[in-house]
Amino acid sequence: MERKKSSLVIVYHRQPYEEVKEKGKVLFKENKSPNGIVPALKGFFGEVERGCWVAWKQVSAKEQGSFEKNITINDSFGEYDVVRLPLTAEQVKSFYHVTSKEALWPTLHSFPWLYNYDAVDWNTFREVNRLFAEAACAEAADDAIIWVHDYNLWLVPAFIRKIKPNVKIAFFHHTPFPAADVFNILPWREEILDSLLDSDIVGFHIPRYSENFAGVARSLRGAEISKSKAVEEIFTSSGLPLSEPTVVETLKHNGREILIDTWPIGTNTNIITEHLSSFDAGSRIAQIKNEIQGMKFIFSVGRVDYTKGTKEMLEAFDRLLERRKELIGKIKFFVVCVAPAKGMTVYKAAQRDIESLVGSINGKYGTLGWTPIMLSTRPIPFDELVSYYKTADVCWITPLRDGLNLVAKEYIASKASEPGALILSEFTGAAVELSEAIYANPYSGKDMDEAIDRAIDMSDDEASQRMELMYEKVKKWDVTYWANHITEQFKLIKNNFKNTQEAVR
């Protein structure tokens, strides 16, 4: 019996579960973290009769013939299908580790000097994108929405449009989108842009990224802005490096109109509150406080990546201890910096720098009874993570560039109105939402020094007031708000949002 076609197909490189092996048997378990992009996307399956998720999995040549490509998952989000593309180790290395991470990633984050063209096999990248598109089209009903996520699947919309021209195509960027002068470094810029313009809707977290995309579309392909509007209440419209007073709403290109959506994903404040109200969380918080022993506690969460600014943050902490001797023995910095997956050689230098700096700082200032920095390179389970957030006096999040940054919102949701200082890079997408944070320019040592001093010295009253104002924003514009917003955008394109030649005329 043929499976029922899906009205919503989500195309994302990550699988929507954690695959574990117990007693020789492979099990598919829900993600340990109930927060973040994967649970947020799975939540949409509850709104449709049938949903499907397309992802990739590395499979050896020996296993290719027996690999189970199509599976059905039934978890707390309901029942949905998963199509897993069996990619070889060579395809994964070329498509993901090299092209995506060595060529596209540095360009997206405005680090063009780190862009590596020589190792790229664009034909393999194109082929993998085609496989994703074919898998999505095979599962999609004729009137489905196919929702494609992130830059490593940039070419998928063009293939979908050729295979199944009448479906609605949505594309969402979780990363920054650079200005035209940086994006145009890519020698495949026309092919990428033409594919994105085959979408019915292209989404971004903040107005700056939408404006950058519109600028590229206008300069490369002569697209026209058919409608703009003032930025929404959620955004700071001026005064910050990523501020924009207006944002493009629709682009006209080749007789079609493309909806440009701008709205940042939120966090799940209710789940965080539930976690923190549990007995286990209370015990864990008490244990952390006992280990801290009254010291000022600074917490930072990220992963090994030169864009995350961990090196610059550690250098600022080194200067803090050098500058303020009275803090020695009275402050503790816990840095969670998750090591890259196996095969991600592009981040090896960054990992060496981080580990070397932590060792140097601990060696320089540590005593028999006190170590200034604790470094964890393993991911911290979400229920533990929120306990650290709750306990931290300061959360230090200063990437050199970041699409949004949910960690900042998770910290705020965990603290609610309790005292807490958030140091936030001006170059994170979330900065244009969280005006009560302590902004820092991670490219300026002096600015970073001033930010950490301000955070440490802030009174509890001021820290509480700032946190309460940020919490009101994070709670109002949470992940449910984002989901409802996206649902409304899907209704627009489902109702044939001016996507025919006649509609434009």
Image (tube, rainbow, N blue to C red):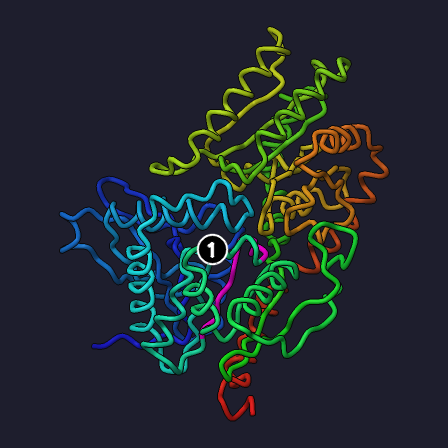
Q: In the depicted view, which residue is nearer to us: 217 or 447?
A: 217
**Which quadrant would residue 118 be assigned to in this image?**
top left
**Does residue 277 show up?**
no
Would you say residue 174 sits in the magenta stretch?
Answer: yes
Q: From the top left corner, tell me how far across and down residue 335 is, in percent.
A: 57, 29
* Relative to 456, 180 lies left or right: left
Kind of residue indicated by mark 1: Val
Q: In the depicted view, which residue is nearer to us: 256 or 84?
A: 256
Q: Magenta stretch: dominant SS?
A: loop
Q: Residue at x 64, y 11 (%)?
A: 365
Residue range highlighted in magenta: 169-179
Q: From the top left corner, tell me how far across and down residue 45 is, in percent.
A: 45, 68
Q: From the top left corner, tell me how far across and down residue 127 is, in percent.
A: 28, 60
Q: Secondary structure at mark 1?
A: helix
**Does residue 305 show up?**
yes
Question: Is residue 403 depicted above or below 137 in this figure?
Answer: above
Q: Which residue is mark 1?
A: 38
Q: Residue at x 57, y 70 (%)?
A: 218
Question: Is residue 76 depicted above or below 364 in this figure?
Answer: below
Q: Quadrant of the N terminus?
A: bottom left
Would you say residue 246 sits in the magenta stretch?
Answer: no
Q: Residue at x 49, y 89 (%)?
A: 501
* Relative to 482, 494 lies left or right: left
Q: In the depicted view, which residue is nearer to us: 437 or 468?
A: 437
Question: Is residue 221 depicted above or below 120 in this figure?
Answer: below
**Which quadrant would residue 360 be assigned to in this image?**
top right
